[in-house]
Amino acid sequence: MLKVLILGGTTEATALARRLVGHRGIDAAVSLAGRTRNPVLPPLPTRIGGFGGVEGLVAHLAEAGVQAVIDATHPFADRISANAAAACARAGVPLRLLTRAPWMAGPGDRWIGVPDMAAAAEAVRDLDQGLDDTVFLTIGRQEVSAFEAAPDTRYLIRAVDPPEPMPALPRATLILDRGPFTLEGEIALMREHAVAAVVSKNSGGSATDAKLEAARRLGLTVVMVERPPGNGVEELRDVDAAVAWLEGMG
């Protein structure tokens, strides 16, 4: 049996876990970082919490006898991915990155590409908006505080869990929700809150892409935060490719 560790937290990780349940040649387990309070648990043995950096992950790979690792974390979980690349290189364990393709701007899109969240906040500050217009933050909860650089803007913040602590944004409205979202629902939400611009990470995938189509149809600006640079790890674009790679190793 090939011992496999899946670094999870995405729909792709859950889909891969489902494919590997009861597999005759692969014994897989999943690790979740624990940043979401009530995560959707995959149907495989699952541990929650960090490893303690590169050294801790190296130790875990040895103790658990892991023979292959699939990094299926969020495209913006750059610290976890960097630690996985370093630990697997040190331990001599093969590693692949299972990641969705990034979104691409198309006809009718009004995107402003920025390299990081600080630049996104600066772009929001520079937008020519009226006092009654709203900026829709669809970036999760961990980096909302970057927008304290533009505190006078009206914000609609959507996240699975509330930011801790809540940033000093006196005109912010918080919505707790988890995708996937529908196009009709996104259009209705943006109209209800008079959204003029959307801030998004370029996560890719279908669970939250309805907001981009809604912004396109409503003629809204999208401030798109591009992905952090990778670690040179070979990428797999879908679950079928990940399963094939693992079965080839076994």
Image (spheres, helix red, strand yellow):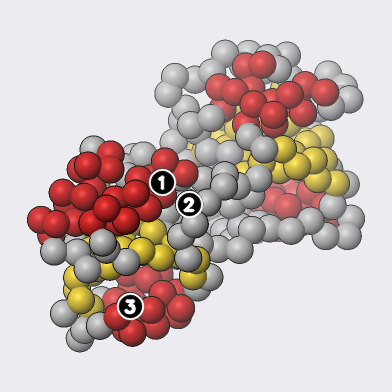
Q: Secondary structure at mark 3?
A: helix
* Figure check: 170 above or below 141: above
Q: Secondary structure at mark 1?
A: helix
Measured from the top left, where is residue 188 in percent x and y?
73, 47
The residue at the far left in this view is 63
Amino acid carrying mark 2 in the image: Asn
Query: Which mark identifies residue 96?
Result: none
Query: Which mark identifies residue 82?
Result: 1
- Label 2 crowding class (10 Å Cα cut-off): few <14, some 14-19, many 20+? some
Name which residue lies at 61% across and 63% down. Answer: 101
Residue occupied by mark 2: 231
Query: Which mark identifies residue 246?
Result: 3
Name which residue lies at 82% across and 23% down. Answer: 126
**Residue 41 visible in image:** no
**Residue 241 visible in image:** yes
Measured from the top left, where is residue 235 in percent x and y?
50, 66
Tell me which label, 3 or 2, sits earlier in the chain: 2
Which of 18 and 59 lies nearest the eye of the viewer?
Answer: 59
Quadrant including the C terminus: bottom left
